[in-house]
């Protein structure tokens, strides 16, 4: 059940992050960005802020996905 919730949060975070950053990607890329962002942002945010719960994971996932999109845009040039 935890993996399914993790994927759902990652998908939602990827969708939200791509819309915030104005990136037009296919669904598979959006999901990959969200899940990677959930890994990066979720763990970093939980470690740094020491906040537990799924909401902290979601916020971290969105922030992590935005960070990945930003890095992708910079290094893609």
Image (spheres, grey):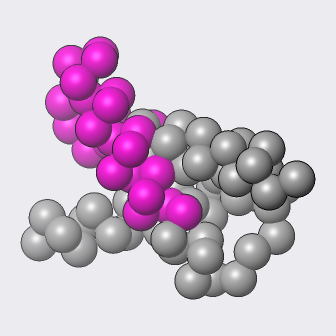
Residue 44 seen in this snapshot: yes
In the image, residue 34 above or below residue 68: below
Residue 20 seen in this snapshot: no
> Is residue 57 rendered magenta in the image?
yes
Disc tally is: 0
In the image, residue 73 above or below residue 63: below
* Residue 42 x %, y %: 33, 41
Farthest left residue in view: 1
Image: magenta residue range:
33-59
Query: For the N terminus, which image quadrant?
Result: bottom left
> Is residue 25 rendered magenta in the image?
no
What residue is at 29 percent from the left and 17 percent from the top? Answer: 48
> Overall secondary structure of the magenta stretch?
helix
Classify residue 58 as left or right of residue 23. left
In the image, residue 27 above or below residue 11: below
Classify residue 15 as left or right of residue 5. right
Can you tell which quarter of the image residue 29 is in?
A: bottom right
* Residue 38 x %, y %: 39, 52
What residue is at 41 percent from the left and 39 percent from the top? Answer: 41
* Residue 67 x %, y %: 60, 40
Classify residue 21 as left or right of residue 31. right
What residue is at 82 percent from the left and 70 percent from the top? Answer: 24
Can you tell which quarter of the image residue 10 is in?
A: bottom left
What residue is at 88 percent from the left and 53 percent from the top? Answer: 77
Can you tell which quarter of the image residue 9 is in?
A: bottom left
* Residue 31 x %, y %: 52, 73
């Amino acid at each position: 059940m935890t993996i399914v919730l993790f994927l759902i949060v990652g998908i939602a975070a990827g969708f939200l992050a791509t819309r915030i950053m104005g990136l037009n990607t296919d669904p598979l890329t959006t999901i990959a960005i969200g899940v990677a962002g959930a890994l990066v942002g979720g763990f970093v945010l939980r470690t740094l802020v020491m906040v537990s719960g799924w909401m902290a994971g979601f916020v971290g996932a969105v922030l992590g996905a935005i960070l990945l999109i930003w890095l992708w845009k910079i290094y893609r040039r």
